[in-house]
Amino acid sequence: MALSASLLLLFLAQGAPAATSVALLTSVGEGDGAAKRDVDAALRNAVEAESGFALLSAAETKEQLSSLADMGLICLPEDTTCFVKLGLAAGVELVLVPVVGPGNDGKVAIEVRVVDVTASSQARQVSAAVSATDQPALARLARQALGLEEAPEPPPPPPAEGEGEGEGEGETPPPTVPEPAPIGLIVTHQRHARE
């Protein structure tokens, strides 16, 4: 019994595994300002609610971005190298970069790029078209960005114009017969010797 109590104390002294540190940037993109603020708040709340993750405060994230800007470094959403530098400066393992654009039917198109600072690469990219105030959908998107949920497969592209319409719909087209090789003349140039 004394041995098991000692093991328990040793386990408690070691503590829980360290949380993955995360910087969540404010949304950029062509989306409406109010929609971006709603998305930012929902994503921040969702990441904060996940155990195993330590989210850098919004004020500290802004301070780190300002420091980079003072050094002349402005990060564009697709610039992984820049976000790796930001992550190193902020001391975080993941940088989440949300991009919000206009959508259809009252929704916004959201894409979150996840930069793994340690690997110096983009870990994944998730996206959804949801209402900016749909808390459950945005929480799901945050969980996908953190790698806690699988992102759904994107829908197949719509058929090209003229495909799948009319007669023969669903049938495979007949194989194409290769055209015969063109027949031509081969002309050589000969030099005539002058006498």
Image: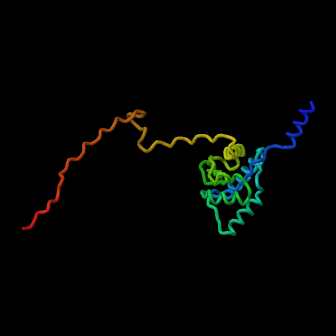
* Quadrant (top left, top right, bottom left, bottom right) of the N terminus: top right
Residue 36 location, quadrant: bottom right
Which residue is at 63% across, 42% downward? 151
* 22 to 136, vertically: above or below: below
Q: How is the image coloured?
A: rainbow
* Quadrant (top left, top right, bottom left, bottom right) of the C terminus: bottom left
Q: Is residue 124 left or right of residue 175?
A: right
Q: Is residue 38 left or right of residue 7?
A: left
Residue 134 coordinates in the image, percent (x, y): 70, 46
* 78 to 70, vertically: above or below: above
Is there any visible trace of residue 110 in the rendered image? no
Q: Nearer the viewer, residue 189 or 76?
A: 189
Q: Nearer the viewer, residue 167 or 39?
A: 39
**Residue at the limit of the structure toward the right, as seen here:** 2
Residue 88 coordinates in the image, percent (x, y): 70, 58
Which residue is at 11% across, 63% downward? 192
Residue 89 coordinates in the image, percent (x, y): 72, 60
Q: Nearer the viewer, residue 10 or 94?
A: 10
* 180 to 187, vertically: above or below: above
Is there any visible trace of residue 87 in the rendered image? yes
**Residue at the limit of the structure toward the top, as seen here:** 1
Which residue is at 68% across, 59% downward? 33
* Count of marks placed on residues: 0
Residue 60 coordinates in the image, percent (x, y): 77, 60
**Residue at the limit of the structure toward the left, as seen here:** 195
Q: Nearer the viewer, residue 15 or 26?
A: 15
